[in-house]
Amino acid sequence: AEAALNEVDSWRTRYDSGLSAMQRDIGTLEAAAGISRHFQPAIVPGLLQTAEYARRVFEITDVRSWGEHADAVAARLDRQQILYQPGKRFEFLLAEAAVRLRVGPPHVMRGQADRIISLMSLDNLDIGVVPLEAEAEIVPWCGFHLYDELPDGQEPFVTIEMPHARLTVSDPGDVAIYQQQLDAIRHATLHGQDARRLLGDITRS
């Protein structure tokens, strides 16, 4: 029973057809949830990425040497259409380090920061940035996605992406840990104009 509530899916065995299949599978999870909450300490979430940023991310994270990065980028951009779908809500909490990590040259990073700023205008998106100078209430062990408001009374669950696999956490007690993590992270998060100002400073640095 415990194994069923906390599952590990190896990228190698689950996605033998490559990165594009992975993107479509993640899109299915996002489509089922009424609200998706994301925390990323080291990289901009896929739903917020520009095409060029996404391409470079696929290149440096493709530990299985799947290739077909152009198709994976196209699939990721297709996923982003859900941001504009009525009735869907999203929360993105990004560590400042996630926006600063140099996955490409300055013009790629500036374009990525500008996209995040532009998406802040969507009413169904709550995007916040945790500044490096903020005092930590928790240790952010890893990035994770929390899917809530699911069909047929399904309980919320969490996914965690690792280099070799995706961990799915469904046990209510374990999911509560990640909900508590989000609560603590929010206390240090900048929103609105303060977040825009920080992102603007990053693009000029």
Image: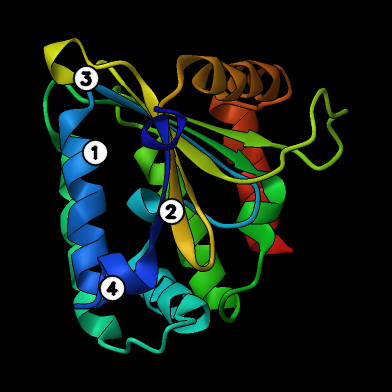
Instruction: Report the amino acid beneath label 2.
Output: Arg
Measured as percent of width and height from the top left, residue 189 is found at 66, 26
Instruction: Report the amino acid beneath label 1.
Output: Glu
Instruction: Report the amino acid beneath label 4.
Output: Leu
Give the secondary structure at mark 2: strand
Where is residue 190, by image quadrant? top right
User: Which is nearer the eye, 53 or 147?
Assistant: 147
Dot 4 or dot 2, earlier in sequence: 4
Measured as percent of width and height from the top left, residue 157 is found at 38, 27
Dot 2 or dot 1, earlier in sequence: 1
Distance Cα–Cα, label 3 vs label 2: 20 Å
Q: Quadrant of the C terminus?
A: bottom right
Q: Quadrant of the N terminus?
A: top left
Identify whether 101 is placed above or below 33. Answer: below
Point out the frontmost of discs 3 and 1.
3
Distance Cα–Cα, label 3 vs label 4: 25 Å
Give the secondary structure at mark 3: loop
Name the residue at 40% across, 89% down.
Answer: 65
Instruction: Report the amino acid beneath label 3.
Output: Leu
Dot 3 or dot 2, earlier in sequence: 3
User: Which is nearer the eye, 162 or 125?
Assistant: 162
User: 10 Å neighbourhood of mark 1: few (<14), some, or many (≥20)?
Assistant: many
Distance Cα–Cα, label 2 vs label 1: 15 Å
Where is residue 104, by image quadrant? bottom right
Residue that numbered label 2 is attached to: 166
Q: Would residue 24 be seen by someone viewing this image from the given angle? A: yes
User: 10 Å neighbourhood of mark 4: few (<14), some, or many (≥20)?
Assistant: many
Measured as percent of width and height from the top left, residue 194 is found at 65, 29
| Residue 30, numbered circle | 1
Dot 4 or dot 1, earlier in sequence: 4
Residue that numbered label 3 is attached to: 150
Identify whether 24 is placed above or below 128. Answer: below
